[in-house]
Every structure is written in structure tokens, then in C-alpha cells.
Image: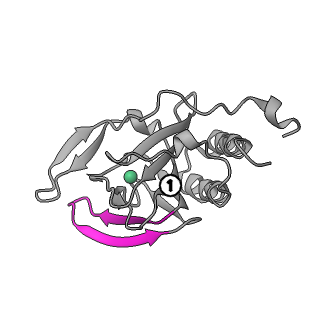
Amino acid sequence: MPGIARLRDFVTGMTRLVERHGADEPRMLDEGEKLLRALVTQDDWLPEEFAAPSQESYRQYLLYCDPLERFSVVSFVWMPGHRTPIHNHTVWGLVGVMRGVEKCEEFSPAIKKTHSHESKPGDVDRVSPSIGDIHVVSNPGKQTAVSIHVYGGNIGALHRHVYDPASGAPKEFISGYHNATVPNLWDRSRSAGS
Ligand code: FE
């Protein structure tokens, strides 16, 4: 069952999960982590245009958004040296690395660095306002990194904050997405039986 069916199955699994346990964040994170790990350990399904890097900055491609905006699935593509500003999320999120290496630096609500760690393919990280959701993500490696993220909302449309590294001052932002079209999950004619 290679190809886009993997993403379709992930979306189906996440939809079932959010229907049953959408109000239970710890359970969403635990069960969602298992689904996301299964997705990112099979690197044969992401269409090339959603893994395309840009010299300019990291890219954020929407792969799917739940019709009720209870969750969204996004691919992030980082060239070596790319990094995000210090930012928050306001909703729960899971970050699964699929290619390359990603470095995550976590910050306290007072915008002091608390932890730093690196993730490799198959690793899944968590964020949420209840466990800490302020961080900087960067690519410390020598190859393009790709990670798949799932968030408890339409992440590109949420009002969030970036923080000044020197003063910690917050500034409102809405991240948006770099793509105008999403992958076609529903053309089952190409893989009869899947
Ligand atoms: Fe983030």
C-alpha cells in the first residue's frame, strides 16, 4: 500500500481519533504519535512538490485540513541552516521527522531557553500550551530535512506569536501556507484495491 494511500490512511486514523478523543489532549498526543510515527517511517508517499525546498526560507505545505478544522497535516522542508523564529502554537502539535535532522530549542513562557535536542527520521516530538509550545526549529544537518506535523487546529490560519530573542516581546503572526493546492487523496483508480 505505498504512495498517497499512506497519507489517506493517516488522515482517516486522525479523523477517527479526533471524533472519539478530541477533547482528551493526552490521548490525542499518545495515539496521534503512534499514527504519525507509522507515517514518517515509510518515506515513499510524499509528492515531490510538497517536499520542494526553497533557498529563501523553510517551506510549510498544507497536506490536509479537517473540514471542521479540528486538525491539520503539514509538511515542513528545511535546507541546511534554515531556522524558524521563536514561536508558539496555541494548540497541541506532533512533529515527526521523515528526512534529515531537525534541532528543536525549547523556551519557557518567559522566553528563556530550557532544552535543546536533535531529532532524526522516525522521531516524534510534542508541543502544546499545557506541556510547553514555544520553540525554535532548525536544520543543523548537511541535507534537506523534511518533517510531517499534525496540529489540533488549522495551524496556518491561527493567530499565534513570534518572540523577539533579546527582549522576549511577542508579536502576532499568522503563518499561512506556501501551497495553494493540496494532494489528491481520493483518486483510488491508480491503486485499485487499496
Ligand atoms: Fe513549531
Q: Position of residue 57 (x, y in %)?
A: 33, 47
Image: 26 above or below 22: below
- Kind of residue sitting beneath label 1: Val
* Quarter of the figure with residue 65: top right
- Of the pair 95 and 128, the residue shown nearer to us: 95
Residue 70 located within the stretch drawn in magenta:
no
Image: 98 above or below 10: below
The span picked out in magenta is 100-119
In screen coordinates, is 123 left or right of 132?
Answer: right
- Of the pair 150 and 80, the residue shown nearer to us: 80
- Give me the residue at 41% from left, 61% from top: 131
- List the residue tagged with mark 1: 146
- Give me the residue at 41% from left, 35% from top: 178
Q: How many marks?
A: 1
Image: 46 above or below 108: above
Q: Position of residue 162 (x, y in %)?
A: 25, 47
In screen coordinates, is 133 left or right of 180?
Answer: left
Local secondary structure at mark 1: strand
Magenta segment, prevailing SS (helix, strand or loop)? strand
- Where's the C terminus, which quadrant? top right
- Give me the residue at 58% from left, 52% from top: 28
Residue 109 located within the stretch drawn in magenta:
yes
